[in-house]
Amino acid sequence: MNIRTKKKAAEIAWFSALCSDDYQFLGVPEGHLRSSFEHCKSIVQKADHKGFQNILLPSSYQVGQDTLAFAAAMAEQTRQIQLLAAIRCGEVHPPMLARTISTLDHMLRGRLTLNIISSDLPGTRLDSTSRYRRSSEVIQILKQAWTQDHIDFRGDFYQIELPSDPVKPYQQQGGPLLYFGGYSEAARELCAQFCDVYLLWPDKEQGLIQSMQHVACRAEKHGRTIDFGLRIHVIVRETEEEARSAAQHLVSRLDPDKGNAIKHRAQDSKSAGVVIQDELRSHADEQGYIEPSLWTGVGRARSGCASAIVGNPDQVRDKLERYIDMGFRSFVLSGYPHLDECDLFAKYVLPDLNTCRLPEVQQRVPTETPATPLTHGPRS
């Protein structure tokens, strides 16, 4: 088993609420926090300015924006931040998806990373085994497009033969990093075989360690090494009392029925990961805490990542550094409202963390502009 822990540094990412997930009071929609282009752009630019290394751009059929179109718009409006763009496997014909990704990667000069999603396509249902088989085929086609002269793939969903020159990415040493989260056996196998960063949702420390070990062992059987990331919310204030008060304030106007409706409008609301998050919350204390500084209240009105690190700057930093000691190399953070909590985390915690960029650590980003048809390579 190979879990990377040599350097105690991590990539710190923020979250832009493209799919109607920004609140002053959880579960109470307010117009100024809608998922408009201007609002989501302001979150990305704030995180860019504050020095976060990456930012997740989620994908959903909910009210919001198309992820890849938004990422393209942000390419020229950001300075240093990477974009972690979510792609739902099967939505776009794989060679055309490869072309879109290649275009984005060149626009961003290697600042593109990808979050692989394997849920049902909106309005459709496919059994889990078939869904992950389709995702596997999409990823294999992308990897052929990025690393081979020709795409030559024969699968159950796709049979494709094409030259790959038109879709060569900026990151020619394997293409953009693939981040993936999922808890079923099929999901973990997909990640272990094809992806680069396994994203977990909050859990007690022992549960996180067991999940990491399980996926690391699977990856080792394929001759691969996996990095680990944690998708989690944060609430940081000058004192622990203020932070806990802010957490309770966030859910103070939540109607349980409204919260449940918000949770179940997401495509992944019945996934294995969401079930685990709900079970975790059922074991929390009266205030919603399952470990010191780990609060489960967000899951009362949110599918997916459902817990937050809550505390003063030292407590939040210590919790993150504890996770880094466990082997995490990436954190995708968020807080409500996203602009305000981004400011607070950047002020109180981010300057004291040892940070890195995983595409650079894994030597995906070239030091000089690569020769491709979209740069200075041969033109046919």
Image (cartoon, rainbow, N blue to C red):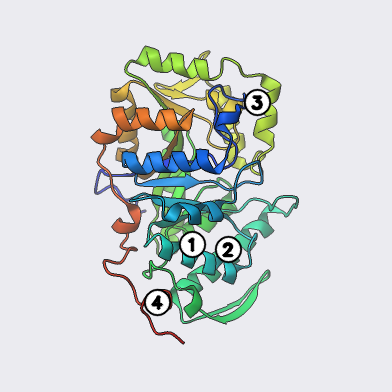
Q: Nearer the viewer, residue 221 or 231?
A: 231
Question: Where's residue 141, x and y in %?
Answer: 55, 71
Question: Where's residue 357, x and y in %?
Answer: 32, 51
Dot 4 lies on which element?
A: loop
Separation of marks 4 and 3 at Cα, in angstroms:
48 Å
What amino acid is at disc 3? Gly
Dot 1 lies on which element?
A: helix
- Circle 4 packing at 10 Å, graded few (<14), some (14-19), many (20+), is some
Q: Are marks 1 and 2 in contact (CB under 8 Å)?
A: yes
Q: Could you tell me which residue is drawn at 46 percent across and 82 percent down? A: 149
Apparent side of residue 6 relative to residue 45 in the rendered image (left or right): left
Separation of marks 1 and 2 at Cα, in angstroms:
8 Å
Residue 341 against residue 134 in the figure, above or below: above
Q: Nearer the viewer, mark 1 or mark 4?
A: 4
Q: Which residue is mark 1?
A: 194
User: Which corner quadrant of the image does residue 46 belong to?
Assistant: top left
Separation of marks 2 and 4 at Cα, in angstroms:
26 Å
Question: Where's residue 175, x and y in %?
Answer: 42, 66
What amino acid is at disc 2? Ser
- The label number, if any, that marks residue 136 in the structure image: 2
Q: Nearer the viewer, residue 138 or 284?
A: 138
- The label number, if any, that marks residue 372 in the structure image: 4
Separation of marks 1 and 3 at Cα, in angstroms:
35 Å
Q: Which residue is mark 3?
A: 259
Separation of marks 1 and 4 at Cα, in angstroms:
24 Å
> How many numbered dots are placed on residues in this image?
4
